[in-house]
Amino acid sequence: MLKVLLPVDGSEPSRHAIKKGIEEGLLKGKEIHVITVVPGAVLVGGYMVGPEMEETNQQLAEDALNEAKAMLADYENVVTVSRKGDPATEILHYASEIGANLIVMGHRGLGTFSKIFLGSVSSRVLNHSNCSVLIVKS
């Protein structure tokens, strides 16, 4: 069975990517994996940014997974997973672990701060993935 990976973060672009996958029939009859990644701490200017936000970030991740599950309620083969770390790295590792055939994701998400310091998650996934990547623009 073909496997589709849907990275989500609760942002409008990630919701739009799920909707596009449904509308285009990309998910029908596929094993669907939904991943969210709670970013780890980041060192900026000698200060750790992130640890105090861990509980909030974890709740946002759970909310994003629950929202995605609700959107995919009509599909049988849905697996959800939450990881911690660098979003692009964790998405790529998980895609490799499951042997994903396609990654469908939004062009940007909630992480403006992360984008400035780490580069665009969608760009990194697109450039380093071993499978096809569909980046959905809203």
Image (tube, rainbow, N blue to C red):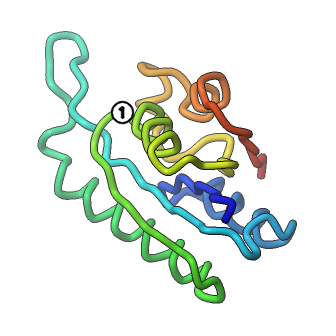
Q: Which residue is located at x 44 percent, y 21 percent?
A: 118
* Residue ID at (21%, 37%): 50
Residue 14 spot, x, y in % from top left: 61, 56
In percent of width and height, residue 1 lies at 67, 65
- The residue that appears at 42% across and 31% down in the rendered structure is 89
Vertical relation: 126 (above or below) 25: above
Residue 98 vs residue 80, the one in the foreground:
98
Expressed as whole percent of the image width and height from the top left, the position of residue 104 reads 68, 51
**Of all residues shown, which one is farthest toward the bottom?**
74
Counting other residues with Cα less than 10 Å from the Cα at mark 1, is it few (<14), some (14-19), or many (20 or more)? some
Q: What's the residue at 52%, 56% (across, down)?
A: 8
Among the 4 quarters of the image, the one containing residue 77: bottom right
- Report x, y in % for residue 6: 59, 57
Left or right of 89 in this view: 30:
right
List the single residue furthest toward the front: 1
Front residue (pair 62, 48): 62
- Hey, what amino acid is under mark 1? Asp
Q: Is 43 positioned to the left or the right of 85 in the image?
A: left
Please tell me whether residue 74 is drawn above or below residue 69 in the rendered image. Answer: below
Up the image or down, 40 lies above or below 53; here it is: above
Circle 1 sits in a helix, a strand or a loop, which is it? loop
Q: How many numbered marks does the figure carry?
A: 1
Q: Which residue lies furthest to the top in this view?
A: 45
* Residue labelled with disc 1: 86
